[in-house]
Amino acid sequence: MAKNAFGHVEWACKDIEKAKTFFGTLFGWSFRPYGEDYYIIKTPEGIRGGLMQVDKVEPGNATVVYVEVEDIDNCLEKVQELGGAVLIPKTALPDMGWYAQFTDLDGRPIGLFESE
């Protein structure tokens, strides 16, 4: 793994089964149990993460994680179909690409990035 790169991203969620379905359907992630109320996230590119069940998710005091996707428009449509909501629509980043933000099932903001 490269130095100074994200090595692990951890998401807290109130309903771990719904979160697994949401993220698995939206991004094609798979999950492997790791201890009690915790799953290791495997992304297509091999970046690791964790999905952790908690009693209360408190958006607003968490880091916004950006997921690089092929097509933000398509992804935002899926977000809404799966019960999430668009926070910031697709917005241009000159000479870089586009970004957007949505909320997942627990109301947590998540960013999307699409390169040029």
Image (cartoon, rainbow, N blue to C red):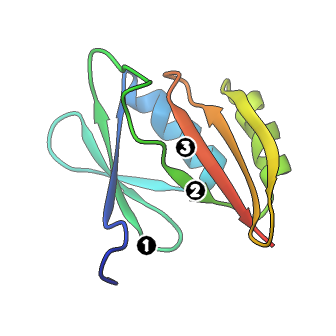
Q: Quadrant of the N terminus?
A: bottom left
Q: Amino acid at mark 2?
A: Val
In the foreground, 44 or 33: 44
**Front disc: 1 or 2:** 2
Q: Picture coordinates of residue 68 (x, y %)?
A: 63, 62
Image position, residue 111 (x, y; %) = 60, 46
Please name the residue that numbered disc 1 is placed on.
46
Query: Of residues 79 and 29, which is closer to you in this image?
Result: 79
Q: Which residue is mark 2?
A: 67
> Are the residues flagged by discs 2 and 3 in contact, CB closer than 8 Å?
no
Distance from Cα at disc 2 to Cα at disc 3: 11 Å
Q: Quadrant of residue 115?
A: bottom right
Tag 3's secondary structure?
helix
For residue 100, above or below residue 7: above
Specify the farthest residue to the bottom.
2
Question: As shown in the figure, which amino acid type bears the numbered disc 1?
Answer: Gly
Mark closer to the chain start, 1 or 2: 1
